[in-house]
């Protein structure tokens, strides 16, 4: 199977993200066609990236090799998945934001009983992971050689028009247009710009802590 995005450099992570739209991710009896993704660059290049300040035990997988999953937990309960890309030693990853369930629909409905419509089953990074039944145990596993719980395969048909805009939920580099989605697709998640919490103003004459 051909994986052309594997050969793109880390500096072209935005191009890799575009290329991955329409690809199919299969795990635990469900297949999702990727309809929305976000690109994240590496060390010192992207303040919104987990790898911006260097390698840690958490983000080590982001530094390659390409074709592996980087999975992390948010809010202590939900999981998000990224596809690692670029050459080894240069951190870059593409966050999987949303997709369309194309196979295993009944299983996906059972895993996401709160979803009112099938279009909402995987319309968000945590929702996508839920329908695929993937968690932290999938971290640092391959998507391309069949050894991991998930397998990535090429699109069945051309992707169509691709739109771009700001990433979701980041506190830095808010306006970098590295979120990509298939224009007009109803499974794309709702865009919400990050809004910082307001801090109480310290009384006059006192320095802040």
Image (cartoon, grey):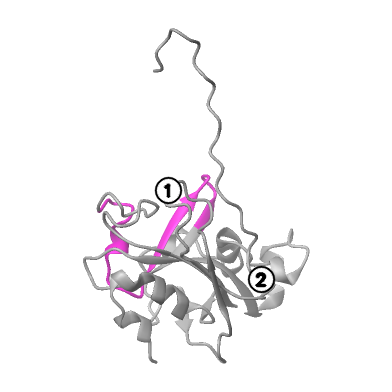
15 lies left or right of 26: left
Quarter of the image with the N terminus is: bottom left
**Residue at left offset 61%, top offset 67%:** 131
The local secondary structure at tag 1 comes to: loop
Which residue in the protein does label 2 denote? 187
Q: Is residue 76 above or below residue 55?
A: above
Q: Which mark is residue 7?
A: none
Q: Is residue 77 visible?
A: yes
Task: List x then y, in percent, for residue 41.
Answer: 34, 62
Query: Residue most toward the right?
Result: 116
- The residue nearer to you, when weighing 191 against 35, is 191
Residue 45: image quadrant is bottom left
How many residues crowd around disc 1 within 10 Å: few (fewer than 14), some, or many (20 or more)? few
Which range of residues does the magenta coloring cover? 55-79
Which residue in the protein does label 1 denote? 172
- The residue nearer to you, when weighing 204 against 79, is 204
Q: CA distance from mark 1 to mark 2?
A: 26 Å
Task: List x then y, in percent, for residue 129.
Answer: 55, 64
Quarter of the image with the C terminus is: top left
Task: List x then y, in percent, for residue 107.
Answer: 67, 73
Whether residue 62 is in magenta: the answer is yes
Tag 1 and tag 2, C-beta contact below 8 Å: no
Whether residue 151 is in magenta: the answer is no
Residue 92: image quadrant is bottom left
Q: Is residue 147 above or below residue 41?
A: below
**Residue at left offset 33%, top offset 73%:** 12
Work out whether mark 1 precedes mark 2 in sequence or the reverse, and give the earlier one. Answer: 1
Q: So how many labels did they put on this image?
A: 2
């Amino acid at each position: 199977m051909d994986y052309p995005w594997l050969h793109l450099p880390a500096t072209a992570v935005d191009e890799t993200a575009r290329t991955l739209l329409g690809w199919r991710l299969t795990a635990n009896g469900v297949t999702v066609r990727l309809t929305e993704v976000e690109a994240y660059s590496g060390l010192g290049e992207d303040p919104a990236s987990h790898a911006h300040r260097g390698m840690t035990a958490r983000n080590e997988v982001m530094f390659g090799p390409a074709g592996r999953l980087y999975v992390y937990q948010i809010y202590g309960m939900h999981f998000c998945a990224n596809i690692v890309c670029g050459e080894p030693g240069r951190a870059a990853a593409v966050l999987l934001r949303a997709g369309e369930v194309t196979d295993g629909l009944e299983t996906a409905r059972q895993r996401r009983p709160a979803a009112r419509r099938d279009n909402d089953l995987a319309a968000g990074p945590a929702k996508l992971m839920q329908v695929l039944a993937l968690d932290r145990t999938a971290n640092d596993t391959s998507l391309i050689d069949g050894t991991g719980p998930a397998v990535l395969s090429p699109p069945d048909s051309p992707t169509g028009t691709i739109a771009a805009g700001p990433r979701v939920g980041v506190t830095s580099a808010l306006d970098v247009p590295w979120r990509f989605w298939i224009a007009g697709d109803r499974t794309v998640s709702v865009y919400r710009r990050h809004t910082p919490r307001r801090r109480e103003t310290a009384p006059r004459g006192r320095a802040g802590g």
